[in-house]
Every structure is written in structure tokens, then in C-alpha cells.
Image: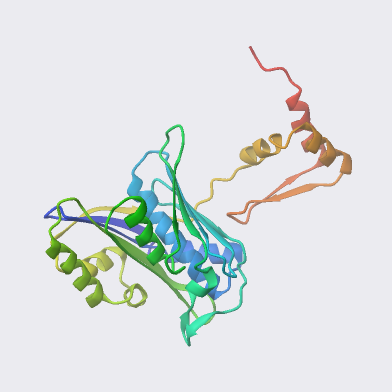
Amino acid sequence: MKDEIVRAMSRDGFVKAVAVSSTQIVERARQIHKTLPTATAALGRLLSAASMMGNMQKVENGSITLKVQGGGPLGTLLAVSDSTGNVRGWIENPQISLLEKYRGKLDVGAAVGMDGMLTVIRDLRMKEPYVGSVELASGEIAEDITTYFAQSEQIPTACALGVLVGVDQSVQASGGYIVQLLPGAPDDVIDKIEAGIEKAGAVTKMLSADMDAETVLKTVLSEFDLEILEHTPVEYRCYCSRERVSQMLVSLGREELADIVQKGEDLHIDCQFCDVVYDYTPQQVQSILDSLDEPDEA
């Protein structure tokens, strides 16, 4: 099943929804960061949420960053999505031992922790990004996303996220959905959404039954006449480049660059989001240092 985002709206105009199939995205993240199952599930949920929220912004060249700091053993989690839904992520402690609520059920909340914040940074291509933060509701990620929308954006929202990890630690299925009420929706719409969610069951159950993103939406919102608006392919995508790393080195300043050159050792810079390593010889660092002394062109 390909990774994709599907957007939909009820024909009565009261509900909008988005779902993502993200199995390949999360498996790629697992391979890059060498995560153990609990970390895979936590980071995978955050990647899925960021992908959907980035796509929902619909701001050209915009991006969204989700940062979770819950005080748990996994440490800080980070996910960044572009305006399409292509996403990348990072986790501070990827190899935390297996934590389970019960056999076969990973305890993501305990691993993430509840003593902290979810921070959402929206880059809408304006002078300053919009930053919103809420206290974590459970550390389970989906509940925390729901709380963010309710408190920071005053949008009634239902969010479900799931990652199914196999016995070989690979990602068997991953995805989720976000359902939101639009202004003017009558009370019975909420009842229909809640009934649909309860009837559909856990998102991992649907994903393990090989449901794609569109089928997930139609299952959850079975009480509504849905109009499918868009199918968008998404992937794990990092935007790092040698040029960007070189610009980062420039920002270190002359003194630190000179110190690197003086040590005479090669410099190895790992991208925190992917498995690319950028190597610089002392001579290449010297060239960057020399460029700082070149006069700007008129």
C-alpha cells in the first residue's frame, strides 16, 4: 500500500477530514534512527500527525513542526512536514527498552511522558512563525493533538494515530486520521462522528486489515455522505544539502572555524533527520573561512 494523504468533506459542509497511510514513512524513520518498537510507535505517530497537519495548511512553501517534550525516557521527539505532507523526524533516545501496557500493547504514553508540552510551530511564510503550546494530555500523541486543536485553535477535533510493529521490529502498518467540525455544525453531527469512531474501532485494527486512507475515512465517517477532495502521495523527505551544511558552518564564525582548521582533523556532520553524513577536510573548512574575508560584490 502506498503512502498517501486523503482529504475529504461531508457534503453537508459540517465536517472536514484527512487521513494518512504512512507505513513506508515510519519504516524509513525506523531504519534511519534505528528505533526500538516503543520509539518507533511514538515517532511514527508524531510523523503521521505532522504529515496531515502540514497538508492541511495549504500554504505554498510553508511547513509545520511538532515538538514533544514529555519528560519520559524517549526524551524529545520532533517531526517536520512541508505543505504537501512530506515529513521527516528525530527522536532523542531511539533505543529505549520495550514498554508495554500489557502483552502486545506498547505503552507510548509512559515512554513519552506527561510532564511536558506539545509545541506546534507553523511557518506560514510570514515574518514570524505562529507558535502554540499545550500541556500534554496523555503522551499518547493523538490525544495531545486533539487537545492542541481544542485549546490553541478552538476547533473541535478527533484524532487517531496508530503504528503496528512486527515481531521483527519492522513497521507493518502506520497511519491515522483527523476529523474536525466546521462552524455551524448542529449537535447531532458530533453524535454521528462519535458513533462512527466507536463503531470503526482502533485505527491500528483498520490498518492491519489493509485499509487505505480513503477506506479509513469512509469507515470512520460512515454516517456521512463524503466527498473525496484529494489524494496526495507523501514520503519521508529530508531537505538537507551540502550547501545548507556549509551555510551552517559559516554561522559558527571565524574563531571556531579557525580552531577546526588548526586541529587538522576531518569534520563529519550527520544530518539529524536522515542518514546522510557530510565530510569536510581541513582544507575545505579553510575555504569556507577564506570566503568570509572576501569582499561582497557591489
Number of numbered tags placed on the structure image = 0
Relative to 276, 17 lies left or right: left
Residue 133 to residue 197: above or below: above
Relative to 270, 147 lies left or right: left
Relative to 277, 181 lies left or right: left
Q: Position of residue 165 (x, y in %)?
A: 48, 76
Front-lying residue, 169 or 222: 222
Residue 13 to residue 123: above or below: below
Q: Position of residue 68 (x, y in %)?
A: 51, 59
User: Within the image, what quadrant is residue 245 found in?
Assistant: top right
User: Within the image, what quadrant is residue 20 found in?
Assistant: bottom left
Instruction: Name the image colouring.
Output: rainbow
Q: Position of residue 163 (x, y in %)?
A: 43, 71
Looking at the figure, which quarter contains the N terminus? bottom left
Q: Is residue 233 visible?
A: no
Query: Residue sitting at 42 percent across and 39 percent down?
Result: 61
Residue 219 to residue 234: above or below: below
User: Within the image, what quadrant is residue 92 found in?
Assistant: bottom right
Looking at the figure, which quarter contains the C terminus? top right
Query: Residue sitting at 47 percent across and 86 percent down?
Result: 102
Residue 91 to residue 276: above or below: below
Front-lying residue, 282 or 10: 10
Q: Is residue 21 visible?
A: yes
Query: Residue sitting at 58 percent across and 54 percent down?
Result: 273
Query: Residue sitting at 45 percent across and 32 percent down?
Result: 127
Q: Position of residue 94 (x, y in %)?
A: 60, 67
Pick out the residue farthest to the bottom.
103
